[in-house]
Amino acid sequence: MSSPLLNILLVEDDEVDVMNVRRAFETHHITNPLFVAGNGLDALEQLRNGAMPKDRRIVLLDLNLPRMNGIEFLRELRQDPELCSTPVVVLTTSNDDRDKIQAYKLNVAGYLVKPVKSADVEAAVSAAA
């Protein structure tokens, strides 16, 4: 018996990057439901209001976001008793060691620097599941 699909929330403000993730999913026949939020505030709203299923979910998070950046999002997520155990994989252009350290201190499951190979994303999602 196979397990239910993992619900993926992509938190990304760059439409080209969103399109690239969608294309990579299609290319690799990844059929997981993909939800998209353009910033951290919208992502928290989707996670909290039932816009996506409450179980079997993972967040792919860009750090450079408007309104609420990725680190601020992670802090808020980890402080919320309902959401604190949600797995997060950072998917960003930032190769700054300070960003990596902050992200790992906030218990991310992985940190991938763009551009990434779709196989890396697939492996990170599988590992976090």
Image (cartoon, grey):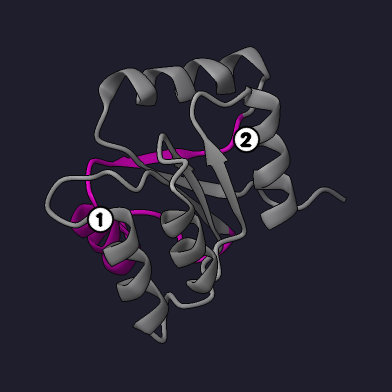
Mark 2: few/some/many CA within 10 Å (<14, 14-19, 20+): many
Residue 95 location, x and y as percent? 47, 41
| Residue 129 appears anywhere in the view | no
Q: Residue at x 57, y 23 (%)?
A: 25
- The disc placed on residue 121 is 2
For residue 104, above or below residue 113 = below
Instruction: Check disc 2 and give the amino acid type.
Output: Val
Query: Residue reaching furthest left?
Result: 67
Q: Quick one: 41 or 69, which is closer to the camera?
A: 69
Dividing the picture into quadrants, the one containing residue 72 is bottom left
- 95 in magenta: no
Query: Residue reaching furthest bottom?
Result: 81
In the image, 2: left or right of 23? Answer: right
Mark 1: few/some/many CA within 10 Å (<14, 14-19, 20+): many
Q: Which residues are magenta?
A: 31-56
In the image, 65: left or right of 7? Answer: left
In the image, 100: left or right of 122? Answer: left
Q: Which residue is mark 1?
A: 40
Residue 54 location, x and y as percent? 46, 65
Residue 67 location, x and y as percent? 12, 53
Q: Residue at x 48, y 72 (%)?
A: 106
Q: Secondary structure at mark 1?
A: helix
**CB contact under 8 Å: marks 1 and 2:** no
Instruction: Check disc 1 and give the amino acid type.
Output: Gly
